[in-house]
Image (cartoon, helix red, strand yellow):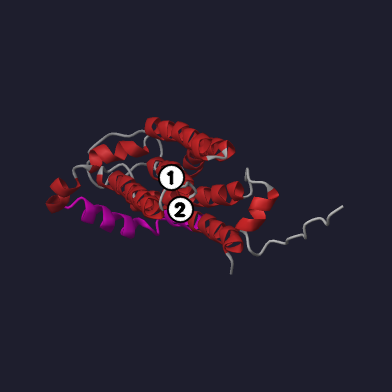
Amino acid sequence: MNARAAVPILALGGVALVVLLAVAVTSGISDAFDHALIQAIRAQELHDLLAPLRTITELGSTGTVTVVAVLTLVVGVLIGPWLHGLIGAVAIGLASLANQGLKAMIGRARPDLLDPIVEERGFSFPSGHSALGMVAWGILGVLVMRSRLPTAVKRAIVVVLAILIILIGLSRIWLGVHYPTDVLAGWTAGAVIVLIYARVTRRVSPEPAAVAVDADPAAQRSDPPGAG
């Protein structure tokens, strides 16, 4: 299976997983899993080790994600094509709206198993920080991978971004404002948007047809016109 065919399958699989998580949440099937993982993450012996998560969580906040959306636009303009950056910024904005709509649809209350370290209002499923963190930092990672930076540098940046996305989700559980299934749903929904973004923008290229053909050995080629 080539990468082009795999993206729609992965995206549909992601959507199906979010739906299954929503069913598990509303039916109570996920309660035992959620409670066990919350208690493990909030174990007293991990408190000092995980304390930096209180700061890291802000990297998935609306304010930070808005900054990342602007940065995505700037990066798109700098490395080209600028339309990639614009689409990325719009995708981040739409992801925020979609997350709020899904929260209202499911209507899951915030965790009450342990006292939260911070207070959050609104519904719990899916985690907005996890979803928007995945979308914002994930799209930025796609742009980095398509840049002309050295391969080692690009991989290092993407690894850092992946760790950041994981820590943002973990922080929401540790702070006591989201269930693990909220975070899993947020990550999954965000990953679907990043996949769709990567697929859509792959078709938007500033390169002339000749350059595009050279970049794709499987593309059809035409013979150069004869003299005269």
- Which residue: 57% across, 58% down? 7
Quarter of the image for the N terminus: give it: bottom right
Q: Nearer the viewer, residue 54 or 35?
A: 54
Q: Position of residue 100 (x, y in %)?
A: 48, 37
Identify the residue position indicated by label 1 in the image: 131
Per the image, label 2 sits on a secondary structure element best described as helix
With respect to residue 30, does 204 lie above or below? Answer: above
Identify the residue position indicated by label 2 in the image: 188
Name the dominant secondary structure of the magenta segment.
helix
Q: Is residue 125 left or right of residue 14?
A: left
Q: Nearer the viewer, residue 14 or 151?
A: 151
Q: Position of residue 218 (x, y in %)?
A: 66, 64
- Which residue: 62% across, 45% down? 205
Span shown in magenta: 19-43
Residue 126: tell me if it is visible. Answer: no
What amino acid is at disc 2?
Answer: Thr
Between the residue at mark 1 and the residue at mark 2, the CA separation in whole angstroms equals: 7 Å
